[in-house]
Structures are given as structure tokens and as C-alpha cells.
Amino acid sequence: MESGIIRNALDFVKEVFENDFSGHDYFHTLRVFKTAARIAEYEDADVETVQLAALLHDVDDRKLSPETHENKDRACAFLKENGVSEARIEIICKIISEVSFSGGVVPDTLESRCVQDADRLDAIGAIGVGRAFAYGGSHSRPMYDPGIPPKLNMTREEYSKRKSTTINHFHEKLFLLKDLLNTNSARQIAEHREAFMQAFIEEFMAEWNGDR
Ligand code: ADP
Ligand code: NI
């Protein structure tokens, strides 16, 4: 059963993401919310804090809302309007910063680790495959090009400049995510998703090479 503030947050994010099709959509937020709550329960973390941070983790995303990104203005305004204390707002905003930090920071708190793991889990498995190709399509990237090999350990600048493919994204990022997870519960969820993703790539390459 959801508390009043969680219901309000669900309505709020639905409105925020109504017109976003970049992969940061309402349903991504909803999946992260559900997975994060599941992990928080297993890990004995503060479930409501995790739920709120998960629901608000992308509302001030750099791409979606560059002018509010720095100070998490939209998330803060929502929390204030809903009577959340300054101290708790600070905790929730710190989680959001840690989750969205692209360098991959290891969070200080258990609550933050739960949300970061849930966000990463949404990039792998069948949903991860779907999101990767949706992203590739919206950024005019080819699915695959045997002439462009994957490249590991790129700097952020290299990564953003380099012409690459969606299949490369699996090798450059998605297959690395399971080892970056913080919690055992998330590692358990990742196992099946990882196996599926490996099988998908194997099948893709076999069809590409005319073996199937
Ligand atoms: P996050 O949800 O962690 O903010 P990103 O904005 O990095 O994630 O990516 C959103 C989705 O788009 C993820 O599922 C990710 O795998 C996918 N994606 C990001 N960059 C690429 C890329 N270069 N090629 C294919 N998919 C990508
Ligand atoms: Ni996200």
C-alpha cells in the first residue's frame, strides 16, 4: 500500500515525463521505483526514502531539464510542497546526485546504493536491450558495424565524440554493469538479465554472420 506522498510523487512524475521519448520516460521511472523498493526491502533500507529518490531521480536530469539539474530544483520543490523536512530533502537530493553521476560514484548510504542499483538494472536484460536500441535509433546510430570495434576505458569526452554502434554499447557499458552493483539483492536480479543479454548478443552475431 502506498502512502499519500508516494501517490503524489507518482502523479508528479507522470506529468513530468509525459512528452519524453529519449528513454527517460515515465515507465523507466516506474520500473526503477518498483525495483528499488524491492531491493530496499531485501536490504532492510528505509523503503520510503528509496521510493521517493527513485521516483524523483530523473526529473532534474541533465538532458531533460538542464536548467534545474544543478540544484535539483524540481525534486526539491515537490518535496517541499509535500511537507518533507529540509534534512530529509537533503538526503534524497544526495541520493539523486549519486545516482545520476555518470562517473559512477559509490554511494555512502544503503538507500542510495539501492536506487543506483535499480537504475543500473533497468539498463540490462530484455528492457536494457530495448532501451539500447531505442536510444541508438533516436541518436541515429547504426545497430552494428563490423568496421567499428568496441573500445573500453574511454574518457567521457572520447565517449561523447566517438561514432559508435548500439552493439558496441553492450561491450562498452552494459556488460560491465553487473560488476558495479552494490547490493547482493541486485546482483541476484542481474544474473538472469545478464545471461539473457549475452544470449541475445550471441544470437544477433550468429544471424549477422549467416550461421542461423
Ligand atoms: P541513465 O538511466 O543511467 O541516466 P543513460 O541516460 O546513460 O542512463 O541511458 C539511458 C538508456 O539509454 C540506457 O538504457 C542506456 O543503456 C541507453 N544508452 C545510453 N547510451 C547509449 C549508447 N551510446 N548506445 C545505446 N544505448 C545507450
Ligand atoms: Ni534513470
Image (cartoon, grey):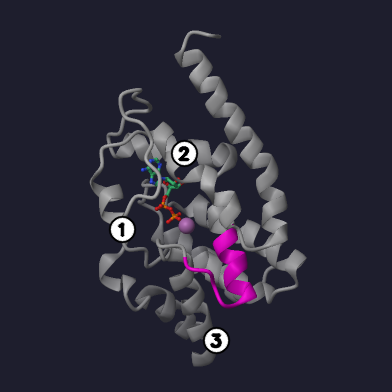
Q: Residues within 10 Å of mark 2 (few under 14, many from 20)?
A: some
Pointer 1 residue? 63
Give x and y (percent) for residue 119: 53, 57
Q: Can see residue 1?
A: no
140 lies above or below 99: above
Q: Secondary structure at mark 3?
A: helix
Q: Residue at x 30, y 24 (%)?
A: 147
**Left or right placement of residue 3 versus residue 83 in this view:** right
If you read the primary sequence from the N terminus, does the residue marked by circle 1 or circle 2 appear first?
Answer: 1
Q: Is residue 112 left or right of residue 23?
A: right
Helix, strand or loop at mark 2: helix
**In this view, which residue lies farthest toward the bottom?**
86
**Front residue of this view, candidates 164 and 123:** 164
Marks 2/3 in contact by CB < 8 Å: the verdict is no
Disc 1, ligand 1: is the CB inside 8 Å?
Answer: yes
Q: Which residue is mark 2?
A: 171
Mark identifier at residue 50:
none
Predominant secondary structure, magenta span = helix
| Residue 190 sits inside the magenta stretch | no
Based on the displayed image, in which of its 4 quarters is residue 17 positioned? bottom left
x, y (%) of residue 55? Answer: 53, 65
| Residue type marked 1 | Lys
Point 55% across, 63% down: residue: 116
Give the residue type at disc 2.
Answer: His
Distance between the alpha carbons at the discs numbered 2 and 3: 38 Å
Cα distance between the residues tagged 1 and 3: 26 Å
Q: Is the CB atom of the residue marked by disc 2 within 8 angstroms of ligand 1's nearest atom?
A: no
Q: How far is mark 1 from mark 2, CA to CA?
A: 24 Å
The residue identified by callout 3 is 88
Left or right, 98 with respect to 164, comes to: right
